[in-house]
Amino acid sequence: MITLSKSDAQLLAEFLAFLRKHGHLLEGYNADVPIEGYILAGCLTVLSFDYLCTFDQEVNYVWTCPWSFGLPLFYINRYAPFVNTILFVYINSNHMTSSQCNTLVQFVIWSIAISSFFSQLIIVLRTCALWRNQITIVTTLLLLLLGTMATTFFFTWKQLSHMSFAPTPSFIPGCLIIEGVNVSLYVYITLFIAELIIIGLTVVKAIQHLRRNQRSWLSQLYKNGIFYCICILLFTLINIVVHLLPKLPYVYKQTFRMPQHVFHSIFSSRVILQILKYRHHFAEQQRTARRRSIDVYGTHNIFTTIIPDTMGESSNSGDIELSESTCEREMMKEMWEREGWEGERVRLAGHGHGRYADGSGWIS
């Protein structure tokens, strides 16, 4: 016979009353097979595995990079999911009061929303760089980003303001969330539209570049970038689908929130690592060829890609990148000429300034 303390007996009575009133929220719930717990453990495993696989790249390409606007974004995007996932594992495996549940869950969900915004910002900045920071593209994407952020934060606030937790006795682990207003679907639809536009812009620019140059490194750069964006889009689509399934138990409709957060972080981090990897390798090759010391990164922003259309843009056109040093500009000019890009520019008579054929600046 099980003996309960007075507090547990009272909580058990309240919990049974909750089940009679909100039993539909726990349909499909199985304490012996905690699906959400398994998914969280899987997310933490994948996150750790990817971290170990790419740690050497972080050391070689990020730690040696001078401080810039992109570095805080990289570190927040890369390490925040570890904190969020571990906290969710803790929440699901330990008994807590309703007050403790409310504090921790609110913190984690807001942390996911904010770090996901930074992940999307990385993809947006990379897309702007691919388009040489054309004012139309930059304005469109920044407005899209701000609209997505406002929508996400509003519906997150609305959902959390109506959230409460079931009273549970000490022998029932985890926090049983009662959400009075489930508006997650609107957040995922907004994200899906934004991600679809970004993929479209990336594909268009890839077609334009690869028609002129079929070099393997350039093709790989675009293939990986598009693949990462498509994977992010698929996770958003999965979250939309599960919220549209009327017969799916409520407890399972939130299970893909953390996988999307984790993989969004992984793919966004790999975008930065890929850019820095190519920049580092090309600079090393040029340094060896010229046999003199040249700063690998100069004062570049971390989002300046190695594609010549995105290098050396004039700051008066609203560029995101920072300007290069004179030594690095000379190095990159020679590198692109050797790589076969000299046909992309014309020299303006009487001016010592390089221009693209369309009139936009390239490397002065």
Image: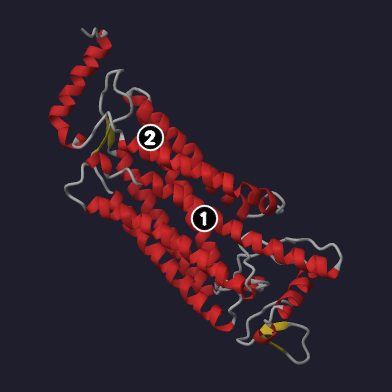
Which residue, given by chain and number where applicable, does mark 1 sit on?
268
Image quadrant in which you'd find residue 280: bottom right
From the image, state whether disc 1 or disc 2 is nearer to you: 1
Tell which residue pokes out farthest to the right in this image: 292
1 or 2: tag closer to the N-terminus: 2
Question: Where residue 86 appears, x then y in whole percent?
Answer: 46, 34
Question: Where residue 277 appears, x then y in whole percent?
Answer: 65, 60
Badge 1 density bin: few <14, some 14–19, many ≥20, Cα 10 Å: many
Residue drawn at x 48%, y 47% as measured from the top left: 115
Three-letter amino acid code at the position of disc 2: Val
Residue drawn at x 50%, y 62% as measured from the top left: 124
Q: Is residue 100 above or below residue 158?
A: above
User: Which disc, if any, is residue 105?
Assistant: 2
Three-letter amino acid code at the position of disc 1: Ser
Q: Is residue 220 above or below residue 259?
A: below
Residue drawn at x 43%, y 36% as measured from the top left: 107
Is 110 positioned to the left or the right of 208 in the image?
left
Image quadrant in which you'd find residue 89: top left
Which secondary structure lies at badge 2? helix
Q: Is residue 321 above or below residue 263?
A: below
Q: Nearer the viewer, residue 98 or 203?
A: 203
Quarter of the image with the N terminus is top left
